[in-house]
Image (cartoon, coloured by chain):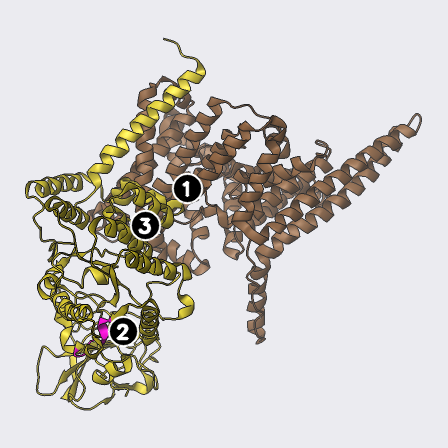
Amino acid sequence: MKFTKKTAYLLNFISLAVVSFLLFHFLGQAVVPVSYADYYKHDLSQMKKKGQTYDLIFVGASRTFRSFDPKVFARETDYKNVLNAGSVAQTIEGSYYLTRELIKKQHPKRLVVGLSYNELFYQQEDKSPRGNMVLYDRLEDPLVKAEFVSKVLKGNDLLYLSNLYRYGSSISPSYLASTWQERKKLAESDFAPVEKKKEYYDGNGFVYSKRTVKKGATPMRSEGTFSEKKVDPDKLALLGKIIDLCKEKGIKVSLVTGPTSLMTMYNITNYQGATDFYTEYAKEKGISYYNLNMLKGRLDLFPDDAMLDYNHVNGEGARRASEKYAKVLKLEDQGKSAGSMFYKDLDQVKKQVDRVVACKATRKFTMPKGTDRKYMNVNSLPAGAQVEYKISYKKPGAKKYRLFAVYSNMTIYDVTGIAKPGTKILIYARIKGHDVPREVYQRYTVSNDGKKLTKKHLRLNDK
Amino acid sequence: MSFISINFYAFCLLLVILYYLVPKRMQLFVLLVFNAWFILASSGALSVFMLITVLTTYGAGRVMNRHEREFKEQAAAIPDITRQQRRELRAVREKRNRRVLLAAMFLNFGIWAVIKYTDFFIQNVNKVRAVMGIPDVPYAHFIMPLGISFYTFAAMGYLIDVSRGKYPADESLLNVAVFVTFFPHLIEGPFSRYDTLGKSLLQAHNFDYENIACGARRILWGLCKKVIIADQLGIAVDTYFGNLKAYTGPYACAAMLLYAMQLYADFSGYMDIACGVSRLLGVKLDENFARPFLSVSVEDFWRRWHITLGTWFRDYVFYPVSLGKAAQKLGHKSRKKFGPRMGKLVPSYLALIFVWVITGLWHGAAWQYVFWGLANLFIIVFSMQMKPLYDKGKALIHADRHPGAWRVFMVIRTFIIVGFLRVMSRTAGFRQCLMMYKNVFRGWEGGWLSVGKWTFFPKMQTISIVTACFFSLLLILVDIFEESGKWEAIKGKTPGFVRALVYALLLAALVICAGETAGTTTGFMYEIY
């Protein structure tokens, strides 16, 4: 059968389109790993089957989804069905579309929006298209999904809609086989939780993590700065839309900042400014805002073993945060303020926790100079504690650390004799009379020009 | 607007649809609008430099046309004009044209040179000032407008041809503007000639399925080269060159060879996309590559790599310099002193030195590029001079009995030499370059044969290594088939469904590899020139 040139080209084009579609579709399905979104959607469908809805919903990024345990709220409050709809790197745009979908289907009594200090900034380095795609996986309404995608994915980011683009880099025969096995198991076990790398899906959107930060080993990171100039008015407007949407439907709204490490808080310049900003905003909108990092007794609430990393609590930390916040919500529902549970501001927090005790440094940095107060601690020792310090050092090429000074309460050490370029100096600190677990340590490296330990003295407590 | 962005292909789709929908007399307007859109989106306010080039090129051309008309009128006005009189009139015309040409070249090359070489000049001045203890002159940090190295050369080539009388200048501003601003050839070339590109660009085009199919295939192949080969290998190459001290011996060699492949895939990938996009509109761009990794000598390599750059410099620098008065005078003197052979060689070598210094500087404003250019020249000249000795050696080992093996040897040898020289364009300076060369010759002490195969591809995922290697081999295989003239026959014999499957697999591999380097991929490597 002979075709005209035009017909031949059209047939070729159609066969290319069909083959491409089939290849992308089937291979695309095969590369999608089992994720928490699968469990989340299963929970929603189970609720639908039972004819029930969620009455308390949390939205927000990772500090939301790791900090609030639905079981605790169900136990401690009158909200019996609680959903943690937070997800990794969820943006305020994502929270808005998720809220729109959830309040339509779930009719909750209260919505809690988790906000970090930079949530509404023009540019957020910790958010990426992948985070938006995690949320995209959780949306169910095709129109909402389409609208969300058109808002947040531009240019080449639209390629994230292709599973091959998102997951293709993991492709190998073993990956495809294991992904297929996992899906099969998931279906056969009716979505029974599977422990992955010491964390597991604990139901209703919450992921329980058993991992803890190694004592004194949380990596130090420099954080950013809060400034109202960095707040994107469009994002602020979206937050306003979330609140208005809920109010229209008679849903109570609360704003919250989930717990993080003291180190993170202290290293964000103008952290108090962020708290004040959200407090003012909430007041204008007639709703509540609480920063769980200002909780009284927070030092004991979130020690190292309640932290997953420098920025998030683990399962135990989430339990504690949830118990506290459940109390807050109970008081709110009774028309009372929970202000007495919190410190007034960061300065009050700092008064309780003012020792420079650090975690293990993973890179070189300069000593704090003059009156700069660089708090680099995950778990500071409490005020009033008598602190002792021990110094050890390791010369370049040496295999082990050698003791330089035993535990004492001296705060100035002359390290002229050992501070050769490349030498690592380890400072241990502990409460006098205690041993581990309150011992933390900090490591410095003498720079190549030998100049980075000011005056060859170590000042450990720069009060 | 990057050639590897969805926005660009949405832009092209819109252009193709409008281009074939509008009446044919409007096609050039549509093209001009899209060219302007592309340039403004990419360069913003710096587009003004391109506007200057377009207007000066057009204006200078019109003036030269006027000189031509005046020459004809004057010649016609003289009854029974003698040859001498005609020659004198022609000389006047040529003198006037030369002034116009020099003015246009001074302005356009001047802009290009100031933007590109001011900081290089300042760097050298500061070195002298440092010796004299005088404070440094601050750097200018001029931002280069997109494609300035390419469109300036294309425009000036056009004016030089007009001044030589090769063809009259185009009286239409629209035509000149479309030629200079044609977006596919802006970023990395080719150096288009008005008489070749103009023929297909400036005529009306009917919708042709063949053009669409060929163009789309070429674009897909170009994207595969860029995303699957160049960007993936770039992960390993960046690791190597980012930590030169750590990689010696076989790793240093691997770095050189991977970089050579990365550069070829990147640059030729761009060319495929540019040619493919042009083909969608029925326009034929000049080819810039002719299977350079199958070259048998460095001289052959430069006839196959960045072809239009080589021919531009040949036609507009080498010939004028070698046939110019100064070179000819030197030639005469050399002939008298050293004999007729030197009399012929000296002007050529002088011109070649000039060409390769400029070629080096065109690639980068740094002395290592000049050195790179001269190193290429040295190898070419050395090969030419040693040819008689070389032929004797070849006869001694009876290389003619095994032409295939001999050719393979020459191809591998050329690839190694070219890869070796290319290091100069990848390292940050002379010191790093020398360190790299030293690394090639040390660190070969035992045990390297037992290292894992993947360690030659640092920081690359398994899937990246597999796809990059597979596609690199595929690229070489396609080149071999093209060289032997069998490629079209192979394509023709392949059933349509099989070809559809191959293209679908290429698309899938492209999307997978794009996801692998998402967020880290940069533009094309020759964009910076």
Q: Nearer the viewer, residue A296 or A434?
A: A296
Q: Mark 1 points at which residue?
A: B6
Check the rendered structure and report the hue given to chain A.
yellow
Badge 3 and badge 1 both on one subunit: yes
Can residue B289 be seen in this snapshot?
no
- The N terminus of chain A, quarter of image: top left
Q: Residue A442: x percent and y percent?
A: 21, 77
Q: Which of marks 3 and 1 is in front?
A: 1
Quadrant in which residue B336 is drawn: top right
CA separation in Å, label 2 and label 1? 40 Å
- One can see residue A266 in this view: yes
Q: In which quarter of the image is residue B493?
A: top left
Q: Nearer the viewer, residue B268 or A123?
A: A123
What amino acid is at disc 3?
A: Ala
Instruction: Determine the CA span between mark 3 and mark 2.
Output: 38 Å
| Near-viewer residue (B522 or B38) | B38
In terms of image quadrants, where is residue A416? bottom left
The magenta segment: A291-297
**Mark 1 falls on what kind of element?**
helix
The label on residue B236 is: 3
Q: How crowded is mark 1: few (under 14 residues within 10 Å), some or many (20 or more)?
A: some
Q: Residue under mark 1: which chain is it in?
A: B
* Chain brown in the figure, letter: B
- Left or right, A459 with respect to B18, comes to left
**In this rendering, would B459 be left or right of B171?**
left
Mark 2, secondary structure of its residue:
helix
Cα–Cα span, label 3 and label 1: 26 Å
Q: What residue type is disc 2 on?
A: Met
Q: Is residue B15 above or below residue A235?
A: above
* Badge 3 and badge 2 in a common chain: no
